[in-house]
Structures are given as structure tokens and as C-alpha cells.
Amino acid sequence: MKERIINIAIFAVALLVCILAVAFSFFSFDDSKKESYIQTQEIKAQTPKMVSDFENATVENLPALIEQYQGETQERNSNLRSVQLEKDILYTYLQDLKNLDEDSFEAYKANFPQRSAGLFAKSENKQKYVDGFNKVNTFKDLEKYIESVNKDYTAIKQNYLVERNYIKSANALISRAEMINNTASQTKKNADLQTMKTDLKSFERGASLQNTFIILAYVLGIGAAFLMVLFLFANMFTNFKSSYKILVGLLLLVVAAIIGYAVGTSTLSPSAIKAGMTGSGYKMVNSAVFTFYVCLFGAIIAIIATMIMNAVKNRN
């Protein structure tokens, strides 16, 4: 009876996963518009009103919307240049520090007032880094200071990449609207504007649908894990000898996931930024990939070890 319940539960979860996969494939958006979809999501993450305004645009108010958002994007682009300058300054400073050794440290420290005056001349955080380095008294203390500067650099770089991609996406949408606005034919202008609005609305529905499928996937995953643990403990109390190996395997998977999360980086790659991932989410992906590789190589090693052991037994 117990095995029948387990089989029914496994079949139900597998059936739901298949239905989910088929439904997601059926409702997926046009792959040729993938780039526009990603750009729209990047815009909506920061300025949802911009997407909403263009969704509800008319031929009459389109020029005003283009002018408004061109001005806002230009202002953000100007601010981004300041962030880029700070990023580049900090990168140069980090290279200075990383290239130091015990022999060159004292000379660099003695020359630091002159070096910092030139390096941080246009930096908004000059005093912070000058005071920070002045507190580094020995070469042994330098490594900890480099770690703190590197954290600042990583944060600035990540913010820079996110903002740069946003501006690129916003400019793409504005350029499309501007092309429509410059169309000479009134009929074509109306048709093109309606196509753009339809695309934006379909992207919004697609994002909502994607989130729904992700939530369902998480629910199914958590449900499957819960059932697995439930049946494991139920079986453990009745037949512990056959269950402890499973417990050890699960424990190793948990350890692998923790190690993967710990060693994973939170610095987003360009593709991760496009996907709208957060630093913690990216570390979770790293953890999942690391766990997958551990399982893969573990399975390969187990297969090879089993083959060798069987060959030895058969020979004997």
C-alpha cells in the first residue's frame, strides 16, 4: 500500500511537470522579439511608467513622450559617465595595490600623497581612500584593505553595468518610437504605433506568465522535495538499514550546495544582468551548477569504481 502511494505521488508530480513544460512551450513569446522583450523588462524594472506611457501612446502625444524620455535618458547617461569615471579610477587604484610586494610597499606608501593627488583628483571618494590607505601600516595589513576596496569596486561596476544596459534598452524603445513618429504616411504611422503597443502589452503578459510558471515550478520542486523527505523518514523508521545511505547522499548534496553558494560570485555577468538577476540569485545559480557538477562527476566516478570492482570480483 505504501509503495502504491509513493508511485501515485511520483506519477502526479511528473505529470504536472510535463503539463507545465508543454504549457510553457505553447505560450512562449516570439523568439525573434527576445531582445526587445528583455529590454522592455529592464526598463520596467526601473521606470515602469515609461513602458506604460508608450503602451497608451497616441499619435498626438507621441512626440511629447519621445522628448520627455530622451531628456531623462540623456541625464542618466550623463550621470553614468561620472560612475564610469569612479569605476575606472578605482580599477587603477586596485591594480596599484595588487602589484605591490614587501619590497615596493614602503616606497609606494612614501609616495602615496603625490600618487593619490593625481589618481583621485576627480574622485568623489578621494578622502575615503586616502584615509583608508593611511591606516595600512604594514604590508601584511594590505590584503584586508584590498578586499574592502575590491568590494567597493564590485558594487560600483555592477551598478554601472545595470545602468548602462537600462540606458541602452531605453534608447532602443525611444528610437523605435521616434522612427514611428517620423513616418510620413499617417496610415503607416498609426499601424506601426499599434504594433509597438501590442508588442509592449504582449511582453508584459509574457513576463507575468513566465513568473507564474516559475512559481509553479518552485511549488512543484518544493512539493517533490517534501514528499521525498516524508517518504524517506517514513521508510527510515521501518527499515533504517536501507535508508541511512540515502540520508548520507542527501547530506552530501546539501554540503555541495552550501559550498557552491559560498564560493560562487555575486558579480553579475552581462547575460545575468539582461535576465534581471540579483547578486544573491546569481549565487544560487552558481550553487545549483556546482551541485550539478558534483553529482555528475560523482556518478561517473561511482560507475567507473563499480566497473573496476566487478571486474576484480569476476577475475577472482
Image (cartoon, helix red, strand yellow):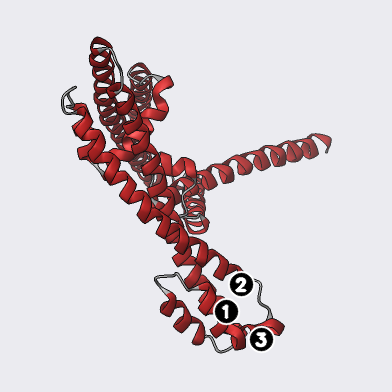
Element under disc 2: helix
Element under disc 1: helix
Q: Position of residue 78 (x, y in %)?
A: 37, 53
Q: Are marks 1 and 2 in contact (CB under 8 Å)?
A: yes
Q: Earlier in the sequence, mark 2 or mark 3?
A: 2
Q: Residues within 10 Å of mark 3 (few under 14, many from 20)?
A: few
Q: Residue furthest top?
A: 187
The answer to whether residue 200 of the structure is visible from this angle is yes
Q: Position of residue 48 (x, y in %)?
A: 23, 39
* Residue type pointed to by label 3: Ala
Q: Residues within 10 Å of mark 1 (few under 14, many from 20)?
A: some
Q: Which residue is mark 2?
A: 96
The dot on residue 107 is 3
Q: Residue furthest front?
A: 184
Q: Earlier in the sequence, mark 1 or mark 2?
A: 2
Instruction: Describe residue 102's horizontal placement relative to residue 124 as left or right.
Output: right
Q: Position of residue 184 (x, y in %)?
A: 29, 15
Quadrant of the image for the N terminus?
Answer: top left
Q: Position of residue 97 (x, y in %)?
A: 60, 74
Quadrant of the image for the C terminus?
Answer: top right
**28 or 84, nearer to the observer:** 84
Q: Are marks 3 and 1 in contact (CB under 8 Å)?
A: no
Element under disc 3: helix
Identified at 40% across, 46% down, the residue is 236
* Residue type pointed to by label 1: Arg
**99 or 246, nearer to the observer:** 99
Identified at 48% across, 44% down, the residue is 270
Q: Is residue 243 above or below residue 255?
A: above
Q: Which residue is mark 1?
A: 115
Q: Is residue 171 above or below residue 76?
A: above
The answer to whether residue 227 of the structure is visible from this angle is no
Which-is-in-front pick, marks 1 and 2? 1
